[in-house]
């Protein structure tokens, strides 16, 4: 059984002005996401600034998300690292606090070979009972998890169940589905390609877009699964200008700016991330107004079915 199906939000980690984690705001955001129909909370991933959290903060943020969610929807924790031992430690800590699944990015910077990736994920899988979603985002990691490698890991390790596919390469994604007999739980890691990936068998998205338009992203996925393909296509198309603006600078710079513009008090970014450039911020605000999420915050209530 899949960890979740539909729209999982890659939720930001809100910060206070002094850059401490703002747990009150995190709880508020999680409650708003659940009220809007989001299907899973994905905590401490790239969008959650996991790379600038201390080990203690990383554990505490995941624990808080589990407590705030109260088993209403699944919680998936980002526990990847470019060090296998560290990834195992983070995964075991997340398992101890009760997450429903793990999102594990490929090692970055040290750029493992495919054999190294098999060893990396196999060791993690052997040291936790939690279901694992592998995360392939070569544009950020410099490391591409090839379809043959995904298939070998999926078939050899019972708790490796999914893939967050963020290559932007539909042919590679199709090959992955082919080699896993269409059985791997694939999630789009590209907000602009959710419907195309669902058309080849993906079961949802791990979404930055959901931070600012959770009801829409949920409705897009739900419509697709109910057979209302035209509604899903329309929501995907209409969201593309916003998605482009949300990735006009390195994630999560734009999405935190967007949330702050919406009055959600996501707070500052931790260095080396910095505030959004003035020109891009202005364009983001224009796109948000056109999409209806600056003047009208109704997207945080469930969309009309």
Image (cartoon, rainbow, N blue to C red):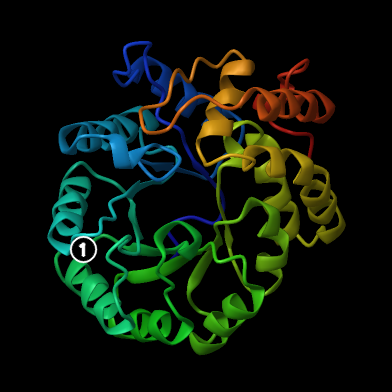
Residue for point 28% across, 29% down: 64
Examine the image and state in which quarter residue 118 appears.
bottom left
Q: Please tell me which residue lies in front, 18 or 289.
A: 18
Whole-percent x and y of residue 85? 12, 60
Q: Quadrant of the C terminus?
A: top right
Number of other residues with Cα within 10 Å of mark 1, as a class: few under 14, some 14 to 19, many 20 or more: some
Residue for point 45% across, 56% down: 140
Q: Please tell me which residue lies in front, 79 or 75.
A: 79
Whole-percent x and y of residue 220? 72, 49
> Mark 1: which secondary structure?
loop
Q: Considering only vertical position in the picture, is 48 above or below 231?
A: above
Q: Please tell me which residue lies in front, 46 or 40.
A: 46
Q: Considering only vertical position in the picture, is 193 above or below 25?
A: below
Q: Considering only vertical position in the picture, is 48 above or below 103?
A: above
Q: Quadrant of the N terminus?
A: bottom left
Whole-percent x and y of residue 278? 65, 22
Q: Is residue 301 visible?
A: no
Residue for point 64% across, 38% down: 246
Residue for point 77% across, 46% down: 240
Q: Is residue 81 left or right of residue 230?
A: left
Whole-percent x and y of residue 146? 45, 80
Examine the image and state in which quarter residue 213 appears.
top right
Tally the marks.
1
Q: Is residue 305 visible?
A: yes
Question: Label 1: which residue?
Answer: 129
Q: Is residue 268 left or right of residue 131?
A: right
């Amino acid at each position: 059984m899949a960890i979740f199906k539909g729209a999982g939000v890659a939720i930001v980690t809100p910060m206070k002005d002094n850059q401490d984690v703002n747990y009150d705001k995190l709880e508020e955001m999680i409650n708003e996401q659940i009220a809007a129909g989001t299907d899973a909370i994905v905590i401490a991933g790239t969008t959650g600034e996991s790379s600038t959290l201390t080990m203690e903060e990383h554990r505490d943020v995941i624990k808080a998300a589990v407590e705030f969610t109260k088993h209403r929807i699944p919680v998936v924790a980002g526990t990847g690292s470019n060090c296998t031992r560290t990834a195992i430690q983070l995964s075991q800590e997340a398992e101890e606090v009760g997450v429903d699944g793990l999102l594990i990015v490929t090692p970055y910077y040290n750029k493992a070979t495919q054999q190294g990736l098999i060893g990396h994920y196999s060791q993690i899988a052997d040291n936790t009972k939690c279901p694992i979603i592998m995360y392939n985002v070569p544009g950020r990691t410099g490391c591409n998890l090839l379809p043959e490698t995904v298939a070998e890991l999926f078939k050899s390790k019972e708790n490796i169940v999914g893939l967050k596919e963020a290559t932007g390469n539909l042919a590679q994604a199709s090959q992955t589905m082919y080699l896993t007999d269409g059985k791997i739980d694939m999630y789009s890691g590209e907000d602009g390609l959710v419907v195309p990936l669902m058309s080849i068998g993906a079961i949802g998205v791990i979404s930055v877009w959901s931070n600012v338009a959770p009801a829409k992203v949920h409705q897009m996925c739900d419509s697709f699964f109910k057979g209302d393909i035209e509604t899903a296509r329309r929501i995907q198309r209409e969201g593309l200008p916003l998605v482009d603006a949300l990735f006009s600078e390195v994630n999560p710079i734009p999405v935190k700016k967007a949330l702050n513009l919406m009055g959600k008090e996501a707070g500052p970014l931790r260095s080396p991330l910095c505030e959004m450039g003035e020109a891009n911020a202005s364009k983001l605000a224009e796109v948000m107004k056109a999409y209806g999420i600056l003047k009208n915050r109704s997207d945080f209530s469930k969309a009309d079915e």
